[in-house]
């Protein structure tokens, strides 16, 4: 197997860091060759607050994945999230010099580059500029403008913004761990790739990724990302509440949440009790499961209500913004019992748990289809998609060289110029928005150094 067809997703989360190595099989499904996990010690609410500990955790996860797979990791696709992420909507336009020429990728690039020049708040940097829909002259709501004629090209954009220092710290950790940044992706978008179907994105869906430190929201409609938000609460806050409410240590609180926790207090009877061993010979503590679920219920209700407020602000109740596919829950926090029922009760929207198993090859380890690995699978998918684009680009370049050779060896009577001029246009702008951002980000890191 060639190493060039292998990609690596690196999920730097608040509770765990996951390195996942994989490739595509002959059926287009992802075959996970190795996975490495490490406890995330230097990240709080999605933001790096201890560089040394984060580097050690990344190295630990990478080494484990390398030993399992037998492959050496050099490049990784990294996810970015955290409470410093915010999004805004912006409209912009360009006036084209020649309205009689068809609109091409270069015009869209010029428009996106213009948005990148927007003045942000001090210490903020634009991460993604995602086009929503276009307007050519007076014609509105155009999804694909390439090949059309027009003098004025206008678009609505979804702009994702983050703190420069937080972005730089993630890049520094990855580089210091001896790895190269292949690409950077917003984590809710990676999770969406792993658990959402194209039909759901078309119909309108809200993806809720409940992590350890943050809860990420991504809203899709008509196949396009419409809104993103980060709520600075996650599974760790629930654990903290259990720890304080039951007067136990954090490790015991986490075990209680995972093994006996429920988001619906009515499910537990008053006489259901769990005994927690006391510290250093002290008397064991007895905790009723009803009280435990009341603590979990209170905090999850708060998180879901904040998310629902974001969805309402997007305008999901209007005909234009109606989310027919409802809500999809993923991430480690989505494994709490009866969470689906609670979310449906609070929001009144159809809800399901999102598992990344649809894209995984048959016979994959069952643990990989857990919602907690959705982001890692999504990042791996992004990396493999980039590999395919590079291969297509290289094959196109080979074809171009062959065409040019044929033209050079052709009869002098034939005119080769049109062939040579047309050929490079196939190569121009094969890069995705994420690849362009990755290049800008790498330049940004190099300049910072």
Image (tube, rainbow, N blue to C red):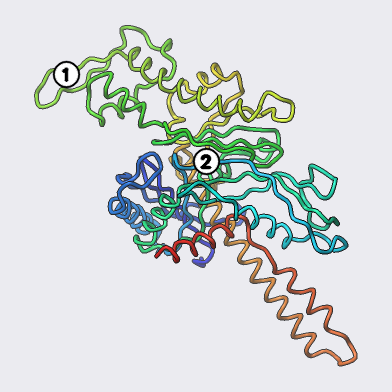
Taking 23 as reference, is 416 left or right?
A: right
Residue drawn at the location 35% of the way across and 22% of the way down: 260
Vertical side of 362 occupied by 310: above or below: above
Label located before the other in sequence (2 or 1): 2
Q: Residue furthest left?
A: 281
Toward which corner of the image does residue 110 lie, by quadrant? bottom right
Few, some or many residues within 10 Å of mark 1 (<14, 14–19, 20+): few
Q: Is residue 215 above or below residue 350?
A: below
Front-lying residue, 99 or 362: 99
* Element under disc 1: loop
Residue 79, x across and y down, in percent: 47, 49
Locate residue 84, reporting x and y percent.
45, 42
Instruction: Farthest residue to the bottom: give it.
Output: 412
Q: Secondary structure at mark 2?
A: strand
| Residue ID for mark 1 | 284
Seen from the viewer's position, the closer of residues 30 and 9 is 9
Q: Label 2 neighbourhood size at 10 Å, few (<14), some (14-19), many (20+)?
A: many
Closer to the eye: label 2 or 1: 2
The image position of residue 66, as x and y in percent, is 37, 59
The label on residue 86 is 2
Residue found farthest to the right: 413
Can residue 268 be seen by looking at this rendering?
A: yes
Image quadrant in which the C terminus is located:
bottom left
Q: Quadrant of residue 337?
A: top left
Q: CA distance from mark 2 to mark 1?
A: 45 Å
Question: Residue 131 versus residue 181: which sits nearer the camera?
Answer: 131
Cβ–Cβ below 8 Å for labels 2 and 1?
A: no
**Residue 246 percent location from the top left of the image:** 26, 19
> Is residue 357 at all visible to an observer of this figure?
no
Seen in the picture, residue 344 relative to 34 is either above or below; the reply is above
Eyeballing the image, is 303 above or below 212? Answer: above
Question: In the figure, is residue 233 to the left or right of 316?
Answer: left
């Amino acid at each position: 197997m060639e190493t060039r067809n292998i990609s690596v997703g690196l999920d730097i989360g608040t509770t765990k860091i996951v390195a996942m190595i994989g490739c595509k099989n002959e059926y287009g499904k992802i075959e996970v060759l190795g996975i490495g996990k490490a406890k995330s010690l230097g990240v709080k609410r999605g933001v790096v607050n201890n560089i040394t500990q984060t580097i050690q955790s990344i190295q630990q996860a990478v080494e484990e994945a390398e030993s399992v797979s037998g492959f050496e990791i050099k490049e990784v696709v990294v996810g970015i999230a955290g409470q410093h992420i915010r999004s805004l909507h912006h409209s912009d336009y360009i006036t084209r010099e020649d309205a009689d020429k068809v609109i091409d990728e270069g015009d869209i690039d010029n428009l996106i580059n213009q948005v990148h020049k927007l003045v942000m708040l001090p210490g903020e940097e634009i991460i993604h500029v995602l086009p929503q829909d276009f307007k050519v002259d007076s014609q509105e709501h155009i999804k694909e403008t390439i090949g059309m004629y027009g003098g004025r090209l206008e678009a609505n954009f979804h702009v994702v913004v983050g703190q420069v220092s937080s972005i730089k710290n993630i890049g520094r950790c990855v580089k210091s761990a001896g790895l190269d940044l292949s690409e950077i992706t917003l984590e809710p978008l990676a999770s969406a790739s792993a658990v959402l179907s194209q039909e759901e994105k078309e119909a309108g869906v809200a993806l809720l990724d409940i992590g350890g430190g943050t809860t990420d929201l991504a809203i899709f409609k008509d196949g396009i990302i419409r809104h993103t938000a980060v709520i600075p609460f996650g599974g760790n806050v629930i654990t903290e509440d259990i720890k304080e409410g039951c007067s136990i240590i954090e490790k015991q609180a986490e075990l209680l949440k995972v093994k006996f926790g429920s988001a619906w207090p009515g499910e537990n009877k008053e006489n259901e009790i769990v005994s927690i061993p006391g510290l250093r010979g002290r008397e064991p503590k007895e905790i009723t499961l009803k009280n435990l679920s009341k603590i979990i219920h209170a905090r999850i209700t708060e998180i879901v209500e904040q998310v629902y407020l974001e969805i309402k602000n997007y305008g999901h109740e209007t005909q234009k913004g109606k989310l027919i596919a409802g809500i999809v829950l993923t991430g480690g926090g989505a494994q709490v019992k009866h969470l689906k029922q609670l979310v449906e009760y609070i929001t009144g929207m159809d809800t399901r748990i999102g598992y990344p198993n649809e894209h995984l090859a048959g016979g994959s380890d069952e643990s990989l289809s857990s919602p907690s690995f959705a982001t890692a699978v999504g990042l791996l998918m992004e990396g493999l998609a980039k590999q395919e684009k590079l291969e297509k680009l290289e094959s196109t370049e080979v074809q171009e060289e062959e065409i040019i050779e044929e033209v050079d060896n052709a009869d002098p009577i034939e005119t080769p110029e049109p062939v040579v001029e047309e050929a490079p246009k196939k190569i121009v702008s094969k890069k995705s928005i994420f690849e362009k951002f990755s290049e800008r980000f790498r330049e940004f890191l190099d300049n910072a150094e």
